Amino acid sequence: MPEKSTKNLLLTPGPVPLHPEVQKVLAEPMMHHRTPAFDKIFANVLSGLKFIFQTQESVFIHTSTGTGGLESLLVNCLSPGDEVIAVISGKFGERWAKMAEIFGYKVHPIKVEWGKAVTTAQVKEQLDAHPNSRAVLCQASETSTATAHPIQELGNLISNYPNTLLLVDGITAAGAYPLPMDEWKIDGLVAGSQKAFMLPTGLAFVSFSTKAWPFVEKSKSPRFYFDVRLEKKSNSSGEAHFSSNVPTIRGLDLVIQLIQKEGLDKHFARIHRRAEMTRIFGKKLGLELFSESPSDSVTALKMPSHIDGQKVRQTLEDKFNITIMGGQDQAKGKIIRIGHMGYITDQDMLQLFESLAQTLIQMDPSFLNNQKKENFLLELKKWQEQNL
Ligand SMILES: *Cc1c(COP(=O)(O)O)cnc(C)c1O
């Protein structure tokens, strides 16, 4: 039986475990952001972000959470009164649509059942119904349901509409699995530091396509801190427009170097393998996937109807010092969500599955009989030998 570790194992879809070297960088003495030493780091991260976004466009840094980046995409691309189409398939889609309403845009929602991905046919139908729509808002990975949306297909579709932009919340996608901004014709993309970028919370990264820039120039939404035109001007002379979050940007510099050293493909493959392992061993435990289009950055497993997911979450934390997430709103108690981004070792994944099996057996002794439990642990071991 696994023993309770003294170290908390953070397996949530953000924040995520930090690389040990990043932790060291974060602890370094403060430096001023208007110095040649910082300018060098700043230049590195601006070009490194382009590498991760897979874009030729500039990527901008806001000192805000991911939600600030979502606000930035809206206020920079849209004007009050503009019509927008919003994919709402979970908590984060709901939030972005609500934000759009607050800024005075007219929102045409596409409501998607939780756990399902939107289809291009649904988006096309809304575009045909509302041909004046200036943007389509969509999560790449809807974290609340662990669902990946077909962004590449949406990019192809929306590229046929010269007056409509595809704005993508890539907060649990950009840097976790392939989401090449230019190739997939994404017009506005946002990422966040505490998710796929494996840093503390507090930075948002945004980028705009060539198609989006005329919208940025013309937007009449009130914007000041998030006005990327200011940031663009300062960045072109190597500076940030406002004060920089120096420690996190130094951490970002290191994260980008680590990813570049490993290669984007290998980095993605490692996250994919954790997701695959979770899907395979979740199934072996008798747990179905909640999502019909599972994301690689987070997995949602359905709980059997007589087991409360919130209790599973709590027990893993209290007994095994492992933090995962439960479901939100309508999925509360019905699912558990396990994050795959961040500095997670293979040993951590094994610890999770041993502890999860133990927790489920504790809640329902008939869940896995002794024979099945032995088999499960043997299979885990075998998988470890073959894959890790
Ligand atoms: C976490 C998350 C957000 C919100 O990010 P904050 O940093 O909490 O503001 C938005 N969208 C998605 C898909 C997320 O996973």
Image (spheres, rainbow, N blue to C red):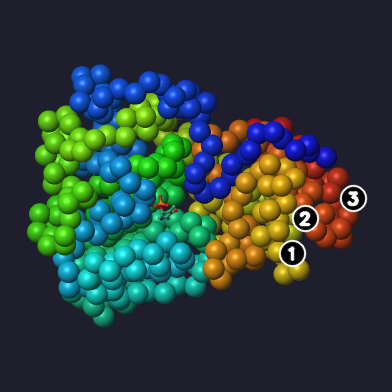
> Residue beneath label 3, please?
371
> Does residue 80 sit above or below 16 in this rendering?
below
First in sequence: mark 1 vs mark 3: 1
Q: Residue 23: where, in percent of width, then height?
A: 48, 27
Residue 156 relative to residue 261: left or right:
left
Circle 1: residue type: Ile
Res. 360 mark = 2
> Does residue 61 sit above or below 239 in this rendering?
below
> Does residue 100 sit above or below 72 in this rendering?
below
Please tell me in which quadrant of the rendered image residue 292 appears: bottom right
Q: Are marks 2 and 1 in contact (CB under 8 Å)?
A: yes
Quarter placement of the N terminus: top right
Residue drawn at (26%, 24%), measured in percent from left and top?
32
Q: Residue 44: where, in percent of width, then height?
A: 28, 27
Q: Are marks 1 and 3 in contact (CB under 8 Å)?
A: no
Using the numbered discs, state the Cα–Cα distance from disc 1 to disc 3 in whole angstroms.
21 Å
Q: Residue 158: where, in percent of width, then height?
A: 26, 63
